[in-house]
Every structure is written in structure tokens, then in C-alpha cells.
Amino acid sequence: MVCAGDPDIISDFIGPKISPTLDGNFFNYWTLRGTFDAANPPDLKATKANMAVFPALNGTSVSFATLEYSVGTLNPPHIHPCAAELLIVVDGILKYNPSSDTPAMDVSAFVLVPSTVFATGIDDNILAKGFETNVPTIKKIKKGLGA
């Protein structure tokens, strides 16, 4: 049997330097509440929950965003070079939102992958499996990072 855990869960959070007390308000972010209430969202509206607006995320390597797409709009092609993205469609059709009468909405979560993970000496085959890619891609990433 294997048992694993964080020996000090408090080390996962970096509290604000301006206040010595951490209360529930520090760990609650209400800006995303009501995000999907608009019947007709603008062309593309992103509401973010990142470290800049939600300091409790400091030290977690995680951020979130909600995106609202009006009828017929799409999520422009883009990349996140230092993060893995999990996108969950919560309403509508997101494959270029072809609908002529229904907006689409999604929630995205991002986990930052530090570039140092490619300089740890972890075998390329393991990295390839972990990132669900192949060894040549891992080698290209390492080369691009100077690792």
C-alpha cells in the first residue's frame, strides 16, 4: 500500500504581504459568478481568475477563465506555451459555434508547466507519456527552451 500527501498544505498558498491575517475573503473569488447570465453575450468575452485578480492562486500554478461567444463567433487559434488547458463547454456548440441562434460558453482551467520540468533529467519517454505526445516533440520543446 502506498500513501502520499502534502506534509504542509499551508505551503501551497502564498499569503498577501500586506495583511498578516488570512480569512475566508482571501480564498473566495466572486467575479465569475453570474458570468453566463447574459442572454446575448458580446462577440467574445473572457472573464479571468488569475493571480493578478485573485491573489489566493499565488503558488498554485493554476488560473481559470470563462469565455462567452456570441452567435457565429469562434475561439481564435492560439497557444498557451507554458500551460496545459482544460476547456469545458457548458452551453452551445463550440466547434466554431456554427449555430445561428445559440451562443456558446465555456470554462477553461490552466495549469502552468514550469520550463524547468524539461531540465530535471526525467527520461524523454516518460515526459512524452506524461504530456501525451512523442519523444521528437519533447526534444523540440527542450531545444526551444535551451534545456
Image (cartoon, rainbow, N blue to C red):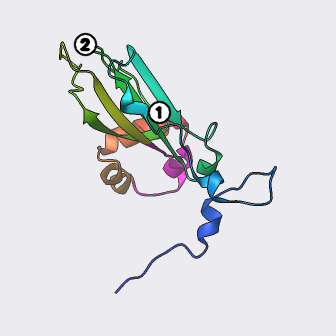
| Percent x, y of residue 39 | 32, 22
Question: Is 74 in the magenta?
Answer: no
Q: Which residue is mark 2?
A: 72
Residue depicted at 56% across the width and 45% down the height: 29
| Percent x, y of residue 139 | 40, 41
- Amino acid on which the number 2 mark rests in the picture: Gly
The quarter holding residue 89 reads: top left
Q: Which residue is mark 1?
A: 81
Packing grade of label 1 (10 A; few <14, some 14-19, many >=20) is few
| Percent x, y of residue 37 | 37, 30
Q: Is residue 73 left or right of residue 48?
A: left
Q: Which residues are magenta?
A: 110-123
Gap in Å between the C-alphas at discs 2 and 1?
Answer: 27 Å
Nearest to the observer: residue 90 or residue 119:
90
Q: Is residue 33 left or right of residue 75?
A: right
Residue depicted at 71% across the width and 60% down the height: 22
Residue depicted at 51% across the width and 51% down the height: 117
Nearest to the observer: residue 122 or residue 17:
17
Nearest to the observer: residue 29 or residue 63:
29
Nearest to the observer: residue 16 or residue 118:
16
- Say which element carries label 2: loop
